[in-house]
Image (tube, coloured by chain):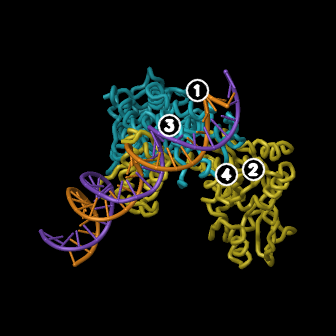
Chain colours: A yellow, B cyan, C orange, D purple
DNA sequence: ATAATCAATAATTTTATGGTATTAAAATAT
DNA sequence: ATATTTTAATACCATAAAATTATTGATTAT
C-alpha cells in the first residue's frame, strides 16, 4: 500500500516485460519470485492500471503495459545519460556525445566529424557504436544515442534528419573479372550474376535502391547472399561468389582483391543522413550539429 | 551506502534545490530534517558527485546540481505525463489505430470515421494505408492493421466482419457516350462494349459481382483492361477505351470527363465491410467499432 | 559572550522490502 | 486418467533501510 512509484519498480517491470515470465525475471534480478510478484502488483495498484495479463501459463503485456515499457526504457536511458553527464559537469568537462553509425559511414563522415569536434571542443567525449538503421532509430528516440548516421528518407515524428554525404554506388567485382571500368557500359552486363548485398533489415533504403538500379537496367537481380559487414561482402566477392553494389566510399580502408566500378551515370545515390531527436537535451548536440551542417549546406 | 538511486531521492533533491534550506525543505516534504540530510548525502554518494555546497549558513547548488535539477524536473514531469497516458491507454482513449482501406472507401466511410474519431478521442492517432483486399486481410491477421475496409463476404477464423456501407453500382461511360441516364434501359445495351474493371486480385468479390451483373443481363463481358486505381480506370474510359462498372460513391472526388449511370434496379450492391481480429488487444479498437457500428445498423 | 539557527551525527523506532514456505491452478509427462 | 512439474500468488517472518527524536558542533546575530 505504498504511495510512491520508485525506480526499483521500473527495473522490475522491465525485467518482467522482457522475459514475460515472473520466475525468470526474478532470477535475472537476483530476487525471489514472490517478492517480484508483489512489487509488480503494488506497481499496478499505485498506477491504478493493469500492466500484465497473467492467464493460464502466459504472461502478456496490456496495451498500457506496452506503452509504459517504451516510456520506462526512455526514462531509464535518459537517467543513465544524466548520471554520466553530471559527473562530467562536476569535472568541468562539457559533456558527452553518443554517436551511432552504419559501418559504411566509418570511411568518411565519422572521422571528419570527430576531428572537427576534438578540435573545437577538446573537453567533449564521444562514444561510437556501429548499429543497424533501425537500432539507431530506436536508440535515438529513447536517448540511447544523441545522433545516428543512417540511410533512410523518412523518420518518425519528433526526429530530425539531414543528409550529410552523397555517394555514388559502385559495382564490386573480383579483381580478375572480365568487366573493368574501361569496358563497362551498363548494369545490364551483370544481368546473370549473383548479387551479394547488405541485408534488408540493416538498411531497407539501400536494399530498395540497389533493386531499383537493377530494375532500371531491365532485370531483377538474383540475390544469393546478404550480410551486414562490408568485409564479409568483399570476401564473398573476392571468392567469386557474386558481385556487389555498395556505396563507392567503401572502397577506402579495405585492401581486398576486388575492383570497384563506379556507377557515375545512374541517378541513384547512397545518401548518408544524420538523425537526432528534436528535443534532445544534450547541450553538446547543438555544437555538434553546427559543425556537421554549418559549413555543409 | 545504498546501491540504487530512487525517485524519492529526486523529490527530496528538488525540494532542497528549490528551498536551498534543509529545514524548510524537510517541512515541505513532511519529513524530519535529519532524515532529509541523510538522504541527500546518500544521493551524493550514489552519484559520486557533490550536488550542494553547505558552507556557513548558506546552501547552494554545485554546477552538477544545477544541471541535475533541470534533468530531474524533466524526468519527473515526463513521468507524470506517462502516468496519465497509461490510464488513457488502458481506457482506449489514447493510442494508435492502423486502418487499411480500398481506394473506393476513401470517398465516404473513411473520412466519416476519422472525423468521428477525432471528435470523440482527440488523443488518438490514426495511420491510413490503401491496400488490396488480401493485403488487408493478412495485415489484420498479423496485427499490422487494426481494421480494414474491404469488399468480401467470408473471412478466415479469428476475424470478424461487418458491412458498413451499401452502395449501388454505376456504369461509367465517356461523357459523350450515346447512352445517358435518361435513355438507359438495362445492362444489355452495353453488350458489345469493352469493360475496364478493377483487377480480380484487388477485390475478387467486386469482380465476381460485376460478372454476375452482366450475366444477369444475358451476356459475358469482354474485359479489356484491369487496374487497381479508380483514377486509371476513369482515364481509360475518358479515352474511349471502354466502359466500367464501379461503386457509385466513386463519383465523388474525381473530376473526369465521364458520366455515371447508376444501376438502381439490379439487386447487386457494392458492400463495403470492416474486418478486424477478434482478439486484437488494441483498446482503441473497441471505441472505434462503437463509433462505426453503434449508430449505423 | 550569549543566544539562536543551521546541518550533521547518534541512537532508536518504524516501515516495508525481500525471503521462506506453501498453495492453487494449470500444463506436461507417464 | 493420474502423477508430476511448473507457474504465479499468498501468508508469514526477518531484516535492511528510512524516518524520528535527541543531541552536537559550527556559524551568525544580538
Secondary structure type for disc 3: loop
Q: Give the secondary structure at mark 2.
A: loop
The residue shown at (57%, 35%) is B231
Q: On the picture, is B294 further left or further right than A24?
A: left
> Share a chain, discs 4 and 2?
yes
- For discs 3 and 2, the disc positioned in front in the rendered view: 3
Read off the chain for label 3: B
Asked whether the beta carbons under mark 3 and mark 2 sit within 8 Å of each other, the answer is no
- Under tag 4, what secondary structure? helix
Residue at the disc numbered 3? B32
Circle 2 crowding by C-alpha within 10 Å: few under 14, some 14–19, many from 20: few
Q: Nearer the viewer, residue A191 or B39?
A: B39
> Do dots 1 and 2 share one subunit?
no
Please report, as a chain letter, where disc 2 is located.
A
Residue B193 badge: none
State the CA–CA distance, disc 1 to disc 4.
61 Å
Cα separation between marks 3 and 1? 76 Å
Q: Which residue is mark 4?
A: A84
Alpha carbon distance from label 4 to label 2: 11 Å
- Nearer the observer: mark 1 or 4; the answer is 4
Mark 1 highlights which residue? B255
The C terminus of chain B, quarter of image = top left
Label 4 vs label 3, nearer the camera: 3
* Alpha carbon separation for disc pair 4 and 3: 31 Å
Question: Do the residues indicated by labels 1 and 4 lie within the same chain of the protein?
Answer: no
Q: Is residue B193 above or below residue A237?
A: above
The dot on residue A91 is 2
Which image quadrant for residue B205?
top left
Q: Could you give the CA–CA distance between mark 1 and mark 2, rounded to whole angstroms? A: 68 Å
Amino acid at each position: 500500500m505504498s504511495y510512491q512509484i520508485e525506480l526499483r519498480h521500473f527495473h522490475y517491470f522491465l525485467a518482467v516485460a522482457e522475459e514475460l515470465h515472473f520466475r525468470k525475471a526474478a532470477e535475472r534480478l537476483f530476487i525471489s519470485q514472490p517478492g517480484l510478484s508483489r512489487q509488480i502488483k503494488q506497481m499496478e495498484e499505485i498506477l491504478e492500471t493493469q500492466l500484465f495479463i497473467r492467464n493460464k501459463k502466459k504472461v502478456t503485456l496490456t496495451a498500457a503495459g506496452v506503452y509504459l515499457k517504451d516510456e520506462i526504457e526512455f526514462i531509464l536511458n535518459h537517467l543513465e545519460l544524466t548520471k554520466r553527464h553530471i559527473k562530467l559537469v562536476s569535472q568541468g568537462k562539457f559533456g558527452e556525445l553518443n554517436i551511432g553509425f552504419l559501418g559504411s559511414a566509418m570511411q568518411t563522415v565519422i572521422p571528419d566529424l570527430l576531428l572537427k569536434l576534438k578540435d573545437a571542443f577538446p573537453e567533449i567525449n564521444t562514444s561510437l557504436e556501429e548499429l543497424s538503421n533501425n537500432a539507431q532509430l530506436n536508440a535515438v528516440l529513447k536517448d540511447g544515442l544523441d545522433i545516428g548516421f543512417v540511410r533512410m528518407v523518412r523518420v518518425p515524428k519528433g526526429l530530425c534528419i539531414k543528409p550529410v554525404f552523397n555517394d555514388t554506388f559502385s559495382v564490386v567485382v573480383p579483381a580478375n573479372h572480365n568487366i573493368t571500368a574501361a569496358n563497362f557500359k551498363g548494369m545490364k552486363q551483370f544481368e546473370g550474376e549473383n548479387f551479394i548485398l547488405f541485408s534488408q533489415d540493416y538498411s531497407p533504403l539501400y536494399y530498395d535502391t540497389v533493386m531499383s538500379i537493377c530494375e532500371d537496367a531491365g532485370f531483377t537481380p538474383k540475390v544469393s547472399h546478404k550480410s551486414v559487414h562490408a568485409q564479409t561482402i568483399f570476401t564473398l566477392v573476392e571468392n567469386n561468389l557474386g558481385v556487389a553494389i555498395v556505396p563507392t566510399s567503401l572502397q577506402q580502408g579495405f585492401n581486398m582483391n576486388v575492383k570497384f566500378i563506379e556507377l557515375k551515370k545512374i541517378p541513384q545515390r547512397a545518401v548518408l543522413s544524420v538523425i537526432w531527436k528534436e528535443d534532445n537535451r544534450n547541450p553538446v548536440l547543438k555544437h555538434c550539429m553546427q559543425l556537421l551542417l554549418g559549413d555543409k549546406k
